[in-house]
Amino acid sequence: MDIFGENVFNDAVMKERLPKATYKSLTKTIRDSLPLDPDVAEVVANSIKDWAIEKGATHYTHWFQPLTGITAEKHDSFISPTSDGRVIMEFSGKELIKGEPDASSFPSGGIRATFEARGYTAWDCTSPAFLKEDGGVLTLCIPTAFCSYTGEALDKKTPLLRSMQALSKQALRILRLFGNTTSTSVTSTVGAEQEYFLVDKKFFDQRMDLMLTGRTLFGAMSAKGQELEDHYFGSIKTRVAAFMHDVNVELWKLGVLAKTQHNEVAPGQFEIAPIFATTNISTDHNQLTMDTLKKVALRHDMVCLLHEKPFAGVNGSGKHNNWSMSTNDGLNLLDPGNTPHENVQFLTFLCGIIKAVDDYAELLRLSAATPGNDHRLGANEAPPAIISIFLGDQLSDIFKQLQNGGVTRSLQGGELASGVITLPALAKDSTDRNRTSPFAFTGNKFEFRMVSSAQSISGPNVVLNTIFAEVFSQFADRLEQASDFDKELRALLKETATNHSRILFDGNGYSDEWVEEAAKRGLPNITSTVDASLVLMRESTVQLYEKHQVLNKTELESRYEINMEQYSKQINIEALTMIDMAKHKIIPAAIKYSTQLANSINAIKTASSAVDVSVQENLLIDLGATLASFKANLTVLENAVQEAADHGDDSYAHSVYYRDVVFKAMGTLRADGDKLESFIDAELWPLPTYAEMLFML
Ligand code: ADP
Ligand code: MG
């Protein structure tokens, strides 16, 4: 309790430190989404500065989220010279509100030419300022949005805030139709469960692939993987427990509601989840969580891997994005109550969400598309690349009733008896869980499970907020016109339930049958980032985003270009890293071992012709053949990378080339490399093995 929020300029600190009128004005701005009064900023800046300096800070930074998907900061000290050769500590309202970082070295997807280098950061007062601690040094961080000189959003925060406004506006229209006159805003809420791997730093340091790309590009599977299912929820090892404790302390100081932690499915894999908050704060907090995991791991001589697929052959990492929306007076709009069939407002929102997910499945798929996540989505792993919704027994039953035009019952869970007298009888939920669904209703929220472990959760939530806002606006347009509201609503729900039943699926999302069935239903199955990104350029996407003022056409185009560019660049880095490791680590090791074998054969033969050297000879032959194939495949990859420039004119063609030619060549080379690993003397193998990395913590 004492340390929680210690490094945050939160509501309690503001109340204590700000003049009453300033505090009132600022909280009103935050609560009711009003424009910021410049005089207020001046007073707040001074107060934040005093607070930060008392805590030991000397510098501040506008903390923003460029389209790299990570955060950016540029530190300035508070010092300001006086005429007598000394300094005073200053921080003005202007400095709080606006920053001018050089924008030319951030991804812009062509929005901004390098000669138009100016960019602006603008204070987001809805996410509190905080002090980030690094090596005992505290820096004041002001959460900000980031835009170009011409005003386009160059970051992940601006569209998120815009999408939250859009959702609020349209959800309120629905609430008003149901007679709610008291709520004044609706906020989307998110709790992001973050998965990650830990490896011992001494192994990490010997793996250039982990260092440069975040994943192993070579590595034969260890004898044991996750098949015994003995890691998930297993007893947490001492070293990991100490790490988790330190992470929690750091996060609590930052006001992050770190709550749940456990071993995940794969060996060496873990999860941390906070208590949910508004989407904006959750997004900032998830960035801080990723940052903290990495930094604290180093203190424990471990490295935290956030990559979606650090190790082939065991589960990758994702981020479950739990999403709901509540009113400013605290109503969770996705809480069905005990008898959802009587909760028509809930059913209206539910139908809206189902329709939106069906209508905009490709946008949702896109929102989780990253080169790293391609290893999970569409690669026989959780979750599948096909978007579908799991509702569970109770809501599925109600949905069927809606199709028939009237709802009369809600299935109930009942009681669960264990058969042991001393154990309590358990109230059973009305609905089981489904772990394979990419979009599952879990009691009073939806869980979007496609999101990748390393990406910012902003993108996925921008899509969720925007597509829901769109369908709610369609519903409101229709219902506001109705002469008989009840009749129109019944018709609307019936129609929605009938037209969108194809998106509902309660079965095993990992099965091949589902892939076939989904194709029959006409559901998209997009397996790569490159293809998923095309939806950004569609006219209907532009219309949707422009209608709700979330992103304009230029901003969408820039995001498309960045997606393509980042894909090509990422695969290029991976290919070059593989080539380097192949040439400087694997081939030399194979030659050394061949020479050892050859020397051994010669030495033994010289000593006595009676000794059987067939084992060494056969090994030498196999090794020679595999090495030759490895070298040939290395040449193929080298040529593929070199020729990539010839396909560079069009960003889509360039990415397709990287996916279909370079990435494929990497897979072939890896197969030979992993085979070499299986032959070669462990003493000579130049890389830490999977068994070491996954099990030695
Ligand atoms: P599980 O792994 O069983 O799905 P967890 O407890 O790990 O569950 O995570 C559930 C997440 O959902 C938590 O972050 C929790 O705070 C969040 N959550 C709960 N209610 C809401 C809500 N109304 N809106 C958004 N997120 C929510
Ligand atoms: Mg979980």
Image (spheres, rainbow, N blue to C red):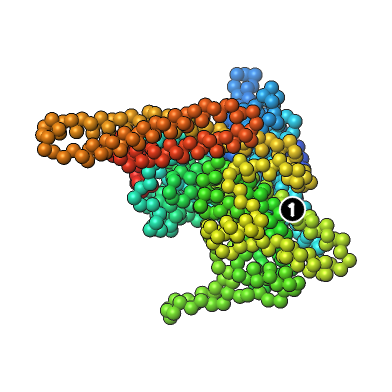
Q: Compared to 639, does 168 lie above or below?
A: below
Of all residues shown, which one is farthest toward the top? Answer: 84
Taking the image as shown, residue 77 lies to the left or right of residue 630, namely: right
Q: Is mark 1 within 8 Å of ligand 1?
A: no
Tell me if mark 1 has few (under 14), some (14-19) or many (20+) residues whose alpha carbon lies within 10 angstroms of its own: many
**Secondary structure beneath disc 1?**
helix
- Identify the residue shown where x is 61% and y is 48%: 526
Taking the image as shown, residue 281 lies to the left or right of residue 239, namely: right
Residue 311 placement (x, y as % from top left): 44, 45
- Label total for image: 1
Q: Which corner quadrant of the image does residue 207 belong to?
A: top left
Q: Give the residue number, with chain letter if any, for mark 1.
A: 469
Q: Is residue 660 visible?
A: yes
- Identify the residue shown where x is 89% and y is 66%: 483
- Identify the residue shown where x is 55% and y is 50%: 378
Of all residues shown, which one is farthest toward the right? Answer: 483
- Front residue of this view, candidates 502 and 150: 502
Residue 231 placement (x, y as % from top left): 40, 56
Instruction: Identify residue type, mark 1.
Output: Ala
Q: Which corner quadrant of the image does residue 475 belong to?
A: bottom right
- Front residue of this view, candidates 231 and 27: 231
Residue 338 placement (x, y as % from top left): 65, 72
Q: Compared to 349, does 305 lie above or below?
A: above
Residue 426 placement (x, y as % from top left): 51, 74
- Identify the residue shown where x is 65% and y is 19%: 83
- Front residue of this view, candidates 143 and 612: 612
Q: Is residue 437 visible?
A: no
Taking the image as shown, residue 237 lies to the left or right of residue 509, namely: left
